Amino acid sequence: LGLVLLAFALSTSIWIFITNEQNPPRTGIFPIRVPVHPVNVTPDLDILGQIDSVVVRITAPSDLWDNLSEASFDASVDLSRAQRGDTEVKVQVRGRDARVRVLEVVPSQVLVRLDVLKRQVISVKVNLQQAPPPGFSYQDPVVDPPQVTVLGPEGLVSLVDVAVADVNLSDSRTTVKQSFPLVPRTARGYDIAGVRVEPQNAVVEVPIVRQISYATLPILPEIKGTPAPGYWVSGARVEPISLGVVGPQDVLQPIGVLKTEPVDVS
């Protein structure tokens, strides 16, 4: 048994030695900042603002280093004992791959601001961006649900006046009915970050109707005056011979041709 264990230890040591020779570990500052997420937040509190990201110094095999990203790390702060106000909390970072070792976190602590969690029911508003194409118009939009709940830090929720669905009609020729994300905004139209809207989306229906008709009409030149003695008008040619016209159907229907402004041949 002793010989078996010795052989296993020797083979393991040789494997580690060869692996390190062929793929030596690399130590240094990871060039991408790692975002920090909170855990164990007290139910009646919420985070005010954002938590600063951190820089980590790590050791990892050379062939793994170039494939690392910010998603390769799990950085968190435990807020189970934090209270309302400003709190310095230690950052815990680990590599999601066991071959990555975190040697240092800068800064080791971050400032977290907590405020009382507030819920508030607000109305949903549709913000129609740009009009439909020429020849089309829209009717009043219908939104479902008409009200949603906004929740977050009390200081931010108190600023929110309405949840807005931005709807662009620039390419719409038929009725629009789809789900749009809701953005919390103030009464003056400023977005409020750091709060959540439940539900996050609303179904908006905007009826699009055809406003005008289209017709292709021939062009008839209107000639006035008399040519010089010994000459007469033998004919007239127009280019282009027709034009597209848009307008209300009741106005277009009685129009058979388009006349030019008078062409004086005197």
Image (tube, grey):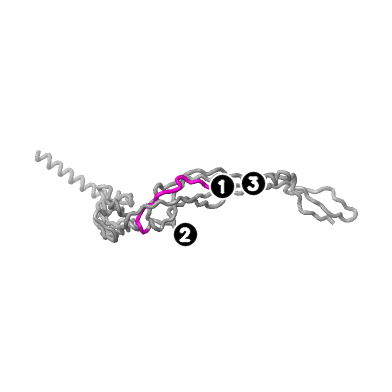
Residue 13 relative to residue 199: left or right: left
Examine the rendered structure and indicate whether residue 55 appears above or below residue 215.
below
- How far across and how far down the image is residue 93, in percent? 26, 53
Region in magenta: 139-155
Residue sticking out furthest to the front: 121
Who comes first in sequence, dot 2 or dot 3? 2
Residue carrying label 2:
188
Residue 143 falls within the magenta-colored stretch: yes
Residue carrying label 1:
139
- How far across and how far down the image is residue 102, in percent? 25, 54
Residue sticking out furthest to the right: 230
Residue carrying label 3:
212
Q: Callout 1: few (<14), some (14-19), or many (20+) C-alpha neighbours within 10 Å? A: few
Query: Mark 2 near mark 3, Cβ–Cβ under 8 Å?
Result: no
Residue 174 falls within the magenta-colored stretch: no
Distance from disc 1 to disc 2, alpha carbons, whole Å, reads 24 Å
Indicate the quadrant containing the N terminus: top left, top right, bottom left or bottom right: top left
- How far across and how far down the image is residue 229, in percent? 90, 55
Q: Callout 3: few (<14), some (14-19), or many (20+) C-alpha neighbours within 10 Å? A: some
Residue 94 relative to residue 234: left or right: left
Who comes first in sequence, dot 3 or dot 1? 1
- Label count reads 3
Residue found at x 15% / y 41% = 8
Residue found at x 36% / y 52% = 119
Residue type at mark 1: give it. Gln
Distance from disc 2 to disc 3, alpha carbons, whole Å, reads 35 Å
- How far across and how far down the image is residue 13, in percent? 17, 46
